[in-house]
Amino acid sequence: MMLAAFVLIVASNFWQKIIGYLILGGGLLFAVSKFRSPWLLLSVILLGGSLHYHQIVQLQPEQPLIIYPDEIEVTDHFMHGLARQDQLQVRIYGKVDAETEHLLKHGAIKLSNWEGEVSKIQPPRNRAQFNYRRYSLSQGIADQVKLRTGQTTVVSWPLAHRLKFKLQQYLSDLPPHLCFFASELLLAKADDEVAIKDNYRQLGVVHLLSLSGLHVSLYCLLVTTIGYRLHFTDEETTIICACLLICGIFLSNWQPGFVRAGISYGIKQVRKFRRWPLANCDILGLTLCLHLCLQPRLFLNVGAQLSYLLAWGLQLTADRSRWQQGLCLNLLIAPVLLANFYGLNLLTCLFNLVIVPYFNCWVMPVTFLGLIPGLTSSCEWLLAASEKIVAKLAAANLGWISFGQLSWWQELVLTGLTLYWLIWLLPIKHKKWQWPWLLYLLCFLSLHFPLHGQVTFIDVGQGDSILLTTPGKRQAYLIDTGGRLNFGSSKPRPAQLLQTTLPYLKAQGITKLDGVFLSHQDADHIGDLRALLKKMPVDHLYFAAGLDKNPHFQRKLAGLKIKTQLHPLLVGDCLQLSPQLQIKVLWPQKPGPGSNEDSLCLLAQFPQASWLFTGDLDREHEKILVKAGVQADYLKLGHHGSKTASDPEFLKAVKPKRVFISAGVNNRYGHPHPETMLTLRKLGLAGDNTAECGMISWTYDLFHRERFSYVLKEPDS
């Protein structure tokens, strides 16, 4: 039933829904015929209701919004977080004046007569990009408000929110390591020390940082021990534990693992005192149904999927040895990990044996001791010293495999077959470990030795970043990296590539790039080059001759310890990168500083079609390419569709079947310009724009088939 609930909630097309209902129907028929339990009937009713009750209340623009300080962040006159309207929650962001910022840092406010842009939270614009819309929907949030103006008044706010805000303030003043672990263990939230979380994720033990059944068990054990020493009755101890768990659920903002463990604890205590005949599997099923009623879109949250799978797996493998149980549990959650994080650690079982005791017996006690004034500095030093060892262990990359992203059907099939294997096949003595690994091997080979190649326009906003790959023994090349335009801001911002290009490369199973082509010096084309070289090996760096003398380019490479080979290019150079891909250089004719006029122009020849990429080359130099007789099947319009490029005579000479524009949504330049779009209409050329379609991919295979796909929507023909 859990598998059916997950499929039905995340289903995005007709066939996924059909498969979900088939799994649900088959599971219910089997369960009812086998167990004939009244608790099962109750679970079925609750589950059915929760699967269909997931309509989210609509925001009423004429009603005021309430904002609590513990649910909002304000920095440099900009706020983002949650606002409330009756029982409805919405995401809110926008600039605020100094007075409003001061009020938000000290108390709750009511926004009346507010004006702003109300919209649905948007889905990701690239494949493998973090799905903020799905994450928000898992919390029952569908709308967002870009606030412009509003009348603010101070209002009273609940004691629970007040205490949570005070705790947030206290934790934020702690040293880095104490702040991180205390925030994770008490609030299930810590965004600043990303490196620490990455270390635990690399070792495959990131679940330790999430409030879960493990922490609930430890907290309840502590309370029970203290209650026993103070001669409390079982009923009194249970009431105290229940109150603490309710507080923990609120503080953790309904973190799925904590809620699951809290509900299970409550049901177990009721079973104990009322002597209800409930097996552990019944408790888990009832917990799931109650949880789905509270949070109908629960399984949109990856943490919830992992929490319930692990809880189920623990029951299925209760009679196994510790190492066998660990291996089975990791095999069970592997499809979810690969579908969402694209990699896993083969030595997770070993690291669990080491890191779990370290975390439970060292990190947690030291963290809670560090909350006591006077012990803070000493505890911070102890945590920092021990975490250096964890960081070195993670940096060694022992056992880590970059697998790639499983498709939805691969995740479903592997999870279902693993459950079948655990329940029915594992007790059989012969050949019980072989076939799961064979399935994963086949999936791995399909990702790392694909039958198709691609040209993909990654939506990096107002900029360019284009991935080229070949089939079979794959080679991967990137044309430009994209990058943020600064516009005079002095504050450094994280590289956009970390949220767009790198996740997509990892999802493809790409762990290194064979080459990167740099068109010219502009930040929206090569601004994220340094971040790319830090995060991923690059064998070759190709650029227009003369760019290597540009100070802006030199700063991108300064201080980096890399083995990348540098290759300046000029017109006439030809690169046979693989049997399926040849690159011809059409511009520049001479070395230059890397301006638009010096843009590297490339003609990529695939077996099925040719592609022309012209960077930001202007009309004057496009006319020179016309004289060279260049033609291509597909063309990436120069300068993001600006009127300074895409000369009509140039387009007529190239004779493309389709053109493409890489531009940001509502960009300040107005790209693509109306003049360019008018030219396309006059010539009868169909054009796709990343601002409208999100990521755009053209794929071809070894059987001479090709197709286009779009992340957001199909373009108008």
Image (cartoon, grey):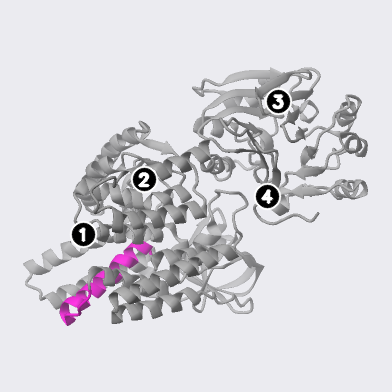
Label 3 sits on a secondary structure element that is strand
- Mark yes or no: residue 225 visible: yes
The front one of 703 and 368 is 703
Which segment is the magenta one? 255-278
Say which residue appears at 22% left-offset and 61% top-offset.
Answer: 217
The amino acid pointed to by label 1 is Leu
Question: Mark 4 — residue?
Answer: 709
* First in sequence: mark 3 vs mark 1: 1
Going by the image, does 283 lie left or right of 408? left
Residue 218 disc label: 1
Q: Position of residue 588 (x, y in %)?
A: 79, 22
Label 2 sits on a secondary structure element that is helix
Residue 582 disc label: 3
Label 3 vs label 1, nearer the camera: 3
Mostly what secondary structure, the magenta segment? helix
Residue lying furthest front:
430
Label 4 sits on a secondary structure element that is strand
State the separation of the CA atoms marked 3 and 4: 23 Å
The amino acid pointed to by label 4 is Ser
* First in sequence: mark 4 vs mark 1: 1
* First in sequence: mark 2 vs mark 1: 1
Say which residue appears at 35% left-offset and 52% top-offset.
Answer: 332
**Is 267 inside the magenta-drawn segment?**
yes
Say which residue appears at 54% left-offset and 57% top-offset.
Answer: 132
Label 2 vs label 3, nearer the camera: 2
